[in-house]
Amino acid sequence: VTEYWCELAWLGDLDGRVERGVAITIEGDRITNVTVDAPPSGVRLDGLTLPGMANAHSHAFHRALRGRTHAEAGTFWTWREQMYRLADRLDPDSYRRLATAAFAEMVLCGYTAVGEFHYLHHDRDGTPYSNPNEMGMAMFAAAAAAGIRLSLLDVCYLQADMTGASLQGTQRRFGDGDAATWVERVDQLRPASTARVGASIHSVRAVDPASMSVVAAAAAARGFVVHAHVSEQPGENAQCATAHGCTPLELLGRTGVLTDRFTAVHATHLGARDVPLLQGRAATCCVCPTTERDLADGIGPTATFRDSGIPVAIGSDSHAIVDPFEETRAVELDERLASLRRGNHRAGELLAMATANGYRSIGWPEGGRLAAGCLADMTTVRLTSPRLAGTDPAEAAAAVVFGATASDVSHVMVGGRTVVCDGAHQQLDVGASLDQSIRALWS
Ligand SMILES: [Zn+2]
């Protein structure tokens, strides 16, 4: 049993109210008691303590693209060609080293859980490794070494486009041939205690409707969450209208994918009938603002989601930037640019996106909250940095959402274990790990 005493803690209030002197008792990987206005005792955490934050959409290997693709012109589709060139270079060992470093950067920045949208499954010519889950096992090992909680959202990817064209070149590494073979492979995944498995449909481009139904049924039978890239680009909507006469979300609805365990990643360019559909099925949307701005995707309708009661989660996706505060405040600030109106999402609502909503989206509904019975995942932000010095304690949640950067994270706990202390990762030199793993890939 360990006792922590938080100078300030945000306990989930959507207006952003914070509590002072919060004592948190932890046994094993769970919080067993939370008391406000408690006298100092146990391990002191100065600053503002938040529930752990979930990065609900990640492709770990994209971290090696940072600084190598962002200055370019071109489109999402030309960027994708560059990403494929990187995917071509990875093997299980280099993928594990890169993902370990990328996940460690996430923890250092305050993320305590990640939903890894994992599609790089097979060898370069598309042949499965002797263990067909070799790459997935590399993700489990990477997350364990980095100290982050993982949902391996294993991706079904079967075709090159909506005409059913077969996978070519790098894409062959993503494909299992058919949905039944995907189910068979996923059933062999064996996660450790801080990891779970979920399902993903890469997009309506990459999976045909009959196979979507197979994935949806398998996920329902196993209690998996299901994620899919949805309407990130207008081009996908146009292709879906031509091939199926409907929007991507309508197609996912028809094939049984849209449920309260479903998360639509991006959901940037939605049609008029899409929002009621998401609302009716109680699905979540995961927005990835720093990636969406990098790829010139557009701005998703998050104020409409809020008005419709559709939960929003956040993800760093391509890792152009890894910073949960930058991601979270972008939800509000991008909405201001689009709507010419301030104050669309309150500070507490934005924190809920980064915490409880993200945890639920990736299949850990018992996380992302500081409450008895919940996972002992917490992130503490010091308020004494040049960015946050002078913060009014009563306004600490808003100060952190709108003013903090990842560098202000001082303490991170995952499952009751301290992974970051005084701003340092306890197991890894994160900068050196990133440097070595990324240079090795490009040399
Ligand atoms: Zn993505």
Image (cartoon, rainbow, N blue to C red):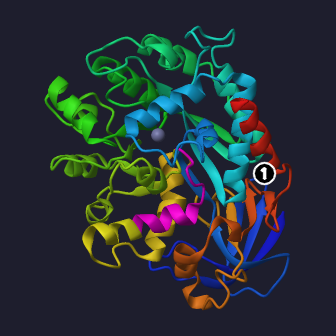
Residue 157 in sight: yes
Q: Nearer the viewer, residue 141 or 65?
A: 65
Give the residue at mark 1. Answer: 431
Quarter placement of the C terminus: top right
Q: Is residue 439 left or right of residue 12?
A: right
Q: Residue at x 40, y 57 (%)?
A: 312
Visible residue check, residue 142? no
Three-letter code for the amino acid on which mark 1 is drawn: Gly
Q: Residue at x 58, y 82 (%)?
A: 18
Cβ at disc 1 under 8 Å from ligand 1: no
Q: Is residue 233 above or below residue 285?
A: above
Q: Secondary structure at mark 1?
A: helix
Q: Position of residue 39 (x, y in %)?
A: 78, 88
User: Where, quadrant-wise, is the N terminus in this rendering?
Assistant: bottom right
Q: Which residues are magenta?
A: 318-332
Magenta span: predominant SS is: helix
Q: Residue 214: say if magenta.
A: no
Where's residue 294, x and y in %?
A: 45, 51
Left/right of residue 314 with respect to residue 11 in the rendered view: left
Q: Quadrant of residue 188?
A: top right
Q: Residues within 10 Å of mark 1 (few under 14, many from 20)?
A: few
